[in-house]
């Protein structure tokens, strides 16, 4: 698999979401954007959400730490965490080179009120990043 | 506090190099050019250049300068030979640390002797006011703030001196550690001192603001093959933390006295009179309650400033003052203050984001370079 970042949707807090429908159920695979990973620089720690946890869009899912700082990781969507990428915390260096495939963090089964309509398109997200850079 | 940020004379260099800039002590400073870890390792293995122009540079001229500095500083200045550099503290009357500084005894080419004091950027204005209160007692002393008209560059790492020395008329490898000399780089005057804040060998130089860009470029050019790398404040902080060096605002504050901070070596209490001396003399006769220690949390997650430390009985016995991932050891390291008796007892835990994690107490520094040569040739 290879995710095309231009087809993903983004939270203004720099998480991406890949929305897929399987047998009538919608899931979001989520991660952190390449822009944010570059800004965070030198990641050293990530704590993953628990499987089974119910989250609202905008809730804190976990934390990522770089050499310098602790940053919250927010859920871009509302739903239940059904899977987490448990190898990721031990291979954070791979996040830099591969934020959209290897860098997936969790899979969330969306509820009907998923919050995805508030997410940004790739173009809008790019615009936000270039304004903040 | 919404005043525009000051820019150092090397600002354009940082921007051209794509540095990420942050606000630090009122200055717009590079935190990192590429990666903190890569810049840190470049300094440990080869050499790194740091713009440290934000550091305050205060010059003392005129008769009575030594007496004024002797009153101001916890170490004696009046016995410093020309070319000497000394680390010292400035205390208030209660023995609290106002700043930690480096003082150099220097002579201009026209044989004017003076002292230069390098102070923390965040303390510069406070110290100017503090010194100005003393000036009426020393009417022939002039204090001049040279910060804005000069720049300061640190070149640190095992290859720093050997590679950069050919740029200067005076070979800095002839300086011993904590010695300084005024020389020039292609007729641009520079003060070179064999000092630093990374735990590596190297030098720091002060030049005129208008010469800074050329001098930086020459250093990068001469160091290109040797792998000289520009490094930002992020790497400077992880380097000094590994080297166990205190940072003002973290390990040092007005609420901490030098003895608690483990800086008794920087206080000469042999009947000298200086501000804070009476309190320090009194305190030196009994063991102080808190001690500065190195901490190795037994987890992959770094402990950060402000995290609390507990003993086996669950009592809060201290706190972390600086903490980060160590790029050299690839493990979290931290410094902090704990109660003296709990240092002996051990069995401590740091509360890291809601979880109490066992931590080892270790001797500082975490990192000591293998070749501690004095640089005497």
Image (cartoon, grey):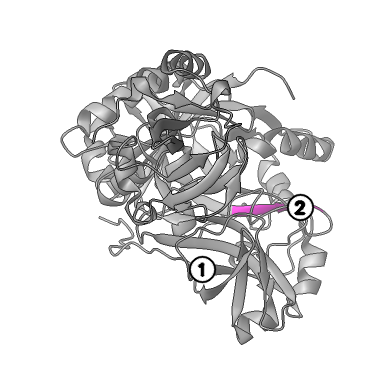
Describe residue B121's horizontal placement relative to residue B156 as left or right.
right
Residue at far bottom of view: B345
What range of the chain is rendered magenta? B88-92
Q: Quadrant of the N terminus of chain B?
A: top right
- Label drawn at residue B133: none
Q: Nearer the viewer, residue B333 or B83?
A: B333
Residue shown at 42% from the left, 13% from the top: A123
**What chain does badge 2 belong to?**
B
Q: Residues within 10 Å of mark 2 (few under 14, many from 20)?
A: some
The percent coordinates of residue A84 (x first, y second) are 42, 51
Task: Determine the image quadrant of residue B181.
Answer: top left
Describe residue B293's horizontal placement relative to residue B364 as left or right.
right
Residue position for label 1: B297
Describe residue A32's horizontal placement relative to residue B361 as left or right.
left
Q: Dominant secondary structure of the magenta stretch?
A: strand
Q: Quadrant of the C terminus of chain B?
A: bottom left
Q: How many marks?
A: 2
What secondary structure is marked by label 2? loop
Rounded to the nearest whole Å, what is the CA distance between mark 2 and mark 1?
Answer: 27 Å
The percent coordinates of residue B270 (x first, y second) are 69, 70
Residue shown at 59% from the left, 26% from the top: B27
What secondary structure is marked by label 1? strand
**What chain does badge 1 belong to?**
B
Q: Residues within 10 Å of mark 1 (few under 14, many from 20)?
A: many
Which of the two discs, 2 and 1, labels the residue nearer the N terminus? 2
Residue A120 visible, this orientation: yes
Q: Which label sits in the foreground, 2 or 1?
A: 1
Residue position for label 2: B254
The percent coordinates of residue B195 (x first, y second) are 43, 48
Task: Determine the image quadrant of residue B289.
Answer: bottom right
């Amino acid at each position: 698999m290879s995710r095309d970042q231009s087809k993903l949707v983004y939270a203004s807090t720099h998480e991406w979401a890949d929305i897929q429908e399987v047998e009538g159920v919608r899931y979001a695979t989520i991660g952190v954007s390449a822009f944010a990973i570059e800004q965070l620089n030198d990641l050293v720690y990530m704590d993953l959400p628990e499987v089974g946890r119910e989250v609202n869009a905008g809730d804190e899912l976990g934390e990522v730490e770089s050499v310098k700082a602790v940053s919250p990781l927010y859920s871009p969507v509302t739903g239940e965490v059904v899977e987490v990428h448990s190898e990721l915390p031990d291979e954070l260096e791979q996040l830099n080179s591969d934020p959209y495939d290897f860098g997936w963090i969790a899979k969330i089964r969306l509820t009907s009120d998923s919050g995805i309509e508030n997410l940004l398109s790739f173009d809008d997200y790019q615009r936000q990043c270039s304004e903040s850079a | 506090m919404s005043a525009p940020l000051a820019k150092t004379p090397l600002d354009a260099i940082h921007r051209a190099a794509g540095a990420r800039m942050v606000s630090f002590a009122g200055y717009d400073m590079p935190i990192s050019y590429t990666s903190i870890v890569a810049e840190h390792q470049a300094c440990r293995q080869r050499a790194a250049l740091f713009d440290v122009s934000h550091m305050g540079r205060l010059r003392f001229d005129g008769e009575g300068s030594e007496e004024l500095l002797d009153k101001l500083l916890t170490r004696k200045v009046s016995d410093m030979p020309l070319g000497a550099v000394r680390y010292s503290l400035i205390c208030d009357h209660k023995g609290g640390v106002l700043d930690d500084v480096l003082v150099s005894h220097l002579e201009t080419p026209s044989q004017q002797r003076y002292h230069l004091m390098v102070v923390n950027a965040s303390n510069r204005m406070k110290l100017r006011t503090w010194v100005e209160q003393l000036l009426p007692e020393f009417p022939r002393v002039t204090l001049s703030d040279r910060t804005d008209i000069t720049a300061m560059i640190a070149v640190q790492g095992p290859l720093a001196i050997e590679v950069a020395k050919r740029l200067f008329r005076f070979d800095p490898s002839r300086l011993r550690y904590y010695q300084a000399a005024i020389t020039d780089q292609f007729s641009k005057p520079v003060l070179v001192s064999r000092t630093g804040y990374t735990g590596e060998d190297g030098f720091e130089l002060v030049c005129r603001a208008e010469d800074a860009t050329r001098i930086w470029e020459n250093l990068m050019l001469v160091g290109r093959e040797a792998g000289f790398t520009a490094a930002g404040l992020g790497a400077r902080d992880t380097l000094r933390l590994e080297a166990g060096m205190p940072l003002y605002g973290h390990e040092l504050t007005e609420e901490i006295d030098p003895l608690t901070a483990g800086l008794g070596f920087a206080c000469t209490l042999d009947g000298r009179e200086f501000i804070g001396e009476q309190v320090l003399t009194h305190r030196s006769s009994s063991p102080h309650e808190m001690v500065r220690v190195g901490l190795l949390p037994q987890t992959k997650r770094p402990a950060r400033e402000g995290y609390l430390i507990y003993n086996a009985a669950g009592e809060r016995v201290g706190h972390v003052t600086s903490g980060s991932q160590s790029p050299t050891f690839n493990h979290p390291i931290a410094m902090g203050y704990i109660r003296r008796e709990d240092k002996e007892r051990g069995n401590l835990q740091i509360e890291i984001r809601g979880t109490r994690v066992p931590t080892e107490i270790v001797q500082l520094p975490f990192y000591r370079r293998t070749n501690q040569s004095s640089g005497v040739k």
